[in-house]
Image (tube, grey):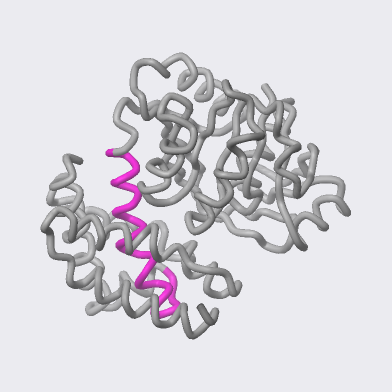
């Protein structure tokens, strides 16, 4: 299978590299120093808990190199989803599938509008990794796992199974879900519980767990997100907010993606993680005062930091 990776950062670089190592033809779309390092070093290096390796493939900054791809791993930041996807529409084959490995639950809405629901697969990604340096992905503790599903349910069951088998044969633990949006809401719940606070205080997950005030704030954020999800028809249990906190002890040394973006001078996924819940809450008549406060503070900070 010909696979294209759009957004070859930590997530795209990791999964694309394992697929390349398994013998698939993989085209990595990257830019800047990351792309230069991949070309200079003859591939992308992965430092994983299972061992280190350098994956080969095609490394480019041109989207038109993906014209014959069968599967696209869509890994760009949520802030760039619409812009990048719009550029891909006239390039990709009409029978190419797009698998989003992004945070949040709003990217699916954008991709559905552009490509049609029948071509969109979605995944909840459970990975702790970061770009150690340009061209080098470092996995941090804990095994990596994917849960994937289709937006158009039963009609896409064969391709979902095929992609799941593809991942598992490449050494990536992958499960299939018949309700992928519920799974992704659960992942969003973790992200919105820890990402915004960690970016705001510039601390790791453990810093939130160890501070009484931050821990209580995190639980309140989780409860507000659950209320929005339930009103939106996603059956999340009320106890999940507290469970999420208790079960995050193994991730106490993890630096969230929003914190990494902030430290690297990149835009944070404020809108996809916080803004979406605030907007959805207003639309559905659910108040989210704690999330809205954190969201406002991060937006002000982002404007000062990046000047927009």
Residue at 88% from the left image edge and 54% from the top image edge: 40
In the image, residue 175 sits, relative to residue 183, either above or below, namely above
Instruction: Specify the quadrant that holds the N terminus.
Output: top right
**In this rendering, would 7 be left or right of 213?**
right
* Among the 4 quarters of the image, the one containing residue 282: bottom left
In the image, residue 293 sits, relative to residue 12, either above or below, namely below
- Picture mark count: 0
Residue 36 visible here: yes
Residue 113 image point, x, y percent: 42, 38
Magenta highlight range: 182-204
Residue at 37% from the left image edge and 29% from the top image edge: 151
**In this rendering, would 61 be left or right of 90?**
right
Residue 254 visible here: no
Residue at 17% from the left image edge and 71% from the top image edge: 289
Q: Main secondary structure of the magenta part?
A: helix
Residue 180 image point, x, y percent: 34, 34
* Residue at the extreme bottom of the image, as rendered: 304
Which residue is more in the foreground, 123 or 252?
123
Residue at 48% from the left image edge and 70% from the top image edge: 259
**In this rendering, would 93 be left or right of 285?**
right
In the image, residue 267 sits, relative to residue 100, either above or below, namely below
In the image, residue 136 sits, relative to residue 143, either above or below, namely below
Which residue is more in the foreground, 155 or 240?
155
Magenta stretch holds residue 34: no
Residue 298 image point, x, y percent: 38, 76
Residue 52 image point, x, y percent: 72, 46
* Among the 4 quarters of the image, the one containing residue 261: bottom right
Magenta stretch holds residue 192: yes
């Amino acid at each position: 299978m010909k696979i294209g990776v759009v957004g070859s950062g930590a997530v795209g670089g990791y999964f694309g590299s394992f697929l390349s190592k398994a013998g698939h033809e993989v085209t990595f779309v990257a830019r800047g120093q990351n792309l230069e390092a991949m070309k200079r070093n003859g591939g992308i290096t992965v430092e994983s808990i299972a061992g280190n390796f350098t994956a080969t493939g095609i490394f480019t900054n041109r989207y038109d190199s993906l014209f014959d791809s069968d599967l696209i791993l869509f890994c760009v930041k949520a802030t760039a989803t619409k812009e990048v996807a719009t550029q891909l529409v006239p390039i990709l084959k009409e029978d190419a599938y797009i698998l989003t490995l992004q945070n949040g639950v709003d990217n699916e809405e954008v991709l559905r509008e552009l490509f049609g629901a029948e071509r969109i697969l979605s995944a909840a990604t459970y990975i702790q990794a970061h770009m150690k340096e340009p061209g080098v992905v470092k996995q941090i503790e804990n095994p990596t796992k994917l849960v994937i599903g289709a937006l158009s349910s039963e009609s896409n069951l064969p391709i979902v199974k095929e992609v799941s088998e593809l991942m598992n044969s490449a050494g990536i633990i992958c499960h299939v879900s018949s309700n992928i949006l519920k799974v992704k809401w659960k992942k969003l719940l973790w992200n919105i519980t820890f990402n915004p606070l960690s970016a705001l205080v510039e601390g790791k997950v453990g810093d939130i767990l160890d501070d009484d005030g931050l821990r209580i704030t995190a639980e309140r954020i989780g409860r507000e997100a659950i209320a929005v999800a339930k009103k939106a028809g996603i059956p999340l249990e009320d106890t999940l907010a507290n469970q999420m906190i208790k079960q995050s002890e193994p991730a106490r040394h993890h630096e969230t993606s929003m914190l990494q973006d902030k430290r690297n001078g990149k835009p944070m996924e404020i809108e996809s993680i916080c803004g979406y819940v605030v907007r959805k809450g207003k639309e559905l008549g659910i108040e989210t005062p704690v999330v809205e406060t954190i969201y406002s503070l991060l937006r002000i900070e982002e404007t000062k930091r990046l000047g927009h």
